[in-house]
Image: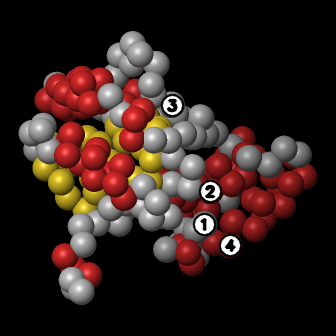
Amino acid sequence: MKPSSDKKHVWDKVNNWEEELLFLKSIIDKTELTETIKWGGPIYVYNKKNVIGIGGFKNYFAIWFLNGVFLKDEKKRLINAQENKTKSMRQWRFTSKEEVNEKEVLEYIYEAIENEKQGKIIQPSKKETIISELLEEEMVLNPALKQAFQKFTRYKQYEFLEYIESAKQEKTKISRIEKVIPMILSNVGLNDKYR
């Protein structure tokens, strides 16, 4: 029996797609991508940038293109596995080896590599500034509170403001302000205890 370290990682949660995933690997091996193991499965990189990954799930096996949003996808093969959450990753699912058209798969992979060479990526969206008029009023009345608040990083300030302003009712906003004032004055960030 071979030692388990001999067995190549195949991102396969249910072990019924091994042959299919090895077939996908044989196609990917024809490209200039390098196989690495990330997040417990094979990810293929170009110039240290993640381009594609492969894996098996309960009802399908798939290639995911980490920046698939930039692919033309003229043949309409790609899906967004998590609409409204996943901005750039796209998945191409298969339910049998026969569905894998090597020429098509290579076209998509080569396009993904080309996009990587051109540096196409989605920049993380900047968080919009949040203004809390109620907190501003408190700071006018209490200059020490304003000074303490300004000592926090922008990120921690944002967390306080988002916490206050995400309340729908004014009375909830007021009770949240009352809760955070001692924290601000003690230089304790809203989520410090979780960090």
Residue of label 4 = 182
**In the rendered image, the vertical position of residue 18 relative to residue 7, given as above or below:** above
In this rendering, position of residue 135 left or right of residue 96: right
120 vs 165, left or right, is: left
Marks 4 and 1, how far apart at CA: 11 Å
Say which of marks 4 and 1 sits in front. 1
Residue at the spot of label 1: 190
Q: Is residue 1 placed above or below 62 in the rendered structure?
A: below
Q: Residue at x 72, y 52 (%)?
A: 164
Q: Secondary structure at mark 2?
A: helix
Of all residues, the one furthest to the top in this rendering is 74
Residue type marked 4: Pro
3 or 1: tag closer to the N-terminus = 3
Q: Specify the quadrant of the image occupied by residue 122.
A: top left
- Asked if the residue at tag 3 contacts the one at tag 2, i.e. Cβ–Cβ closer than 8 Å, the answer is no
Compare marks 4 and 2 and give the one earlier in the sequence.
Answer: 2
The three-letter amino acid code for the residue at tag 1 is Leu
Q: Amino acid under label 2?
A: Phe
Report x, y in % for residue 4. Answer: 26, 82
Type of amino acid at the residue the image marks with label 3: Ile
Question: CB atoms at circles 2 and 1 under 8 Å apart?
Answer: yes
Q: Pointer 2: what residue?
A: 160
The relative height of residue 95 versus residue 19 in the rendered view (above or below) is: above
Work out whether mark 2 precedes mark 1 in sequence or the reverse, and give the earlier one: 2
Q: Is residue 123 visible?
A: no
Q: Residue at x 45, y 47 (%)?
A: 61
